Amino acid sequence: MTGRRLRAVAATPLPDDLAERIREAEPRLDLVVEQDLLPPMRHAGDHQGDPAFSRSEADERRFQELVDSAEVLYGIPDERPSHLARTIRANARLEWVQLMPAGGGAQVKAAKLEQDELERVRFTTTAGVHAVPLAEWCEFGLLAGFKTLPRLQQHQRAHEWAESRWMMRRLEDSRVLVVGLGSIGKVVADRLAHQGVHVAGTSRRDVQVDGVEEVIHPRDLAARVGEFDGVVVTLPGTDETRHLVSADVLAAVKPGVTIANVGRGTVIDQEALVAALQDGRVGFAALDVTDPEPLPEDSPLWDLPNVLLSPHTAALSDKEDALIADLFARNATRYLDGDDLINPVNTREFY
């Protein structure tokens, strides 16, 4: 262990008990948290804090001086990419930023940093922290489609005991394609495999993942997607993943397929998805993410009976903040010991 100390500043809400938890886990970290300069959290995982919060001019100067003194930032100032850019340009000492989202690369991209700035500062995300609740939500979405949730709700709202019974699909022995085998996709695949699902996944690389029987290259999606009863999307939003689930892919799905998306809304061609839901090619879609967000009031997705919408909230749980704090402490130890950091941002593709 090195004798170096590291000055870290909380630029996003961090409860005192979790700050102390970080300090105990890595005593070489000088973590500064000025609660009066940070917006109060409204709920677990509320990294932006209460939108009604504001600082006086004097407090804003104090806050900027504080983040400009950091070698490490816990979160980005006010969760705004433009404030991240300002801080990096004002603080030549800044070496590393721990981003709060699993897809924090999008924040770095939105900051529009120069190449030398991207090379000077390291960025890490919270990928993996949200994997279990998102995997649970994917299972929920698949089961909602397989077990005909819209039909059940229709009869219940009408106070009708259906005259005839109908078949429901089994999750066991079904075939599900997980589009993206990152931290979320791996957990989804493992959980589904333990329920007797035959799981395939997509990757541009030749990888081996627990629970995955076959790895399919994304370029082969349209040719292979028709083999699956369910499709789960876990990919981040990047230039390369935009509309990967394209109109051609959606035209080739198995009739009545269930789709769950917990990645980013841009990965699916949403206009084509609406059309596929309307004509029944897609039997059911469980969407925690949309394009754009918030979803406009006039989007057809609101009123389609075979759609379940969640306002990008499926990842939230009461354990999130503690898991992020623990991840940050582990990364601080790795940073101080000269080891590779967990979840580094790819600053070419920004994921």
Image: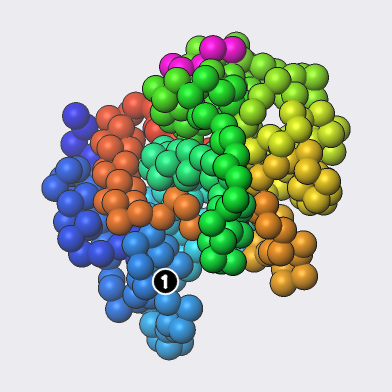
Query: Within 10 Å of the Cα at label 1, are there few (<14), some (14-19), or many (20+) other Cα atoms?
Result: some
The answer to whether residue 3 is magenta is no
Residue displayed at 62% across by 32% down: 230
Residue displayed at 42% across by 77% down: 50
Q: How is the image coloured?
A: rainbow
> Vertically, is 160 above or below 197?
below
Residue closer to the observer: 51 or 98: 51
Residue beneath disc 1:
49
What quarter of the picture does the N terminus occupy?
top left
Residue 97 as seen in the image, left or right of residue 162: left
The span picked out in magenta is 210-214
Q: Is residue 311 visible?
A: no
Residue closer to the observer: 31 or 273: 273
Which x, y percent locates residue 237? 66, 44
Q: Quadrant of the rendered structure where residue 27 is?
A: top left
> Vertically, is 169 above or below 303?
above
Q: Is residue 21 visible?
A: yes
Which x, y percent locates residue 152? 56, 53
Residue closer to the observer: 206 or 300: 300
Residue displayed at 33% across by 38% down: 331
What quarter of the picture does the C terminus occupy?
top right
Q: Of the residues shown, which amino acid type is indicated by label 1?
A: Gly
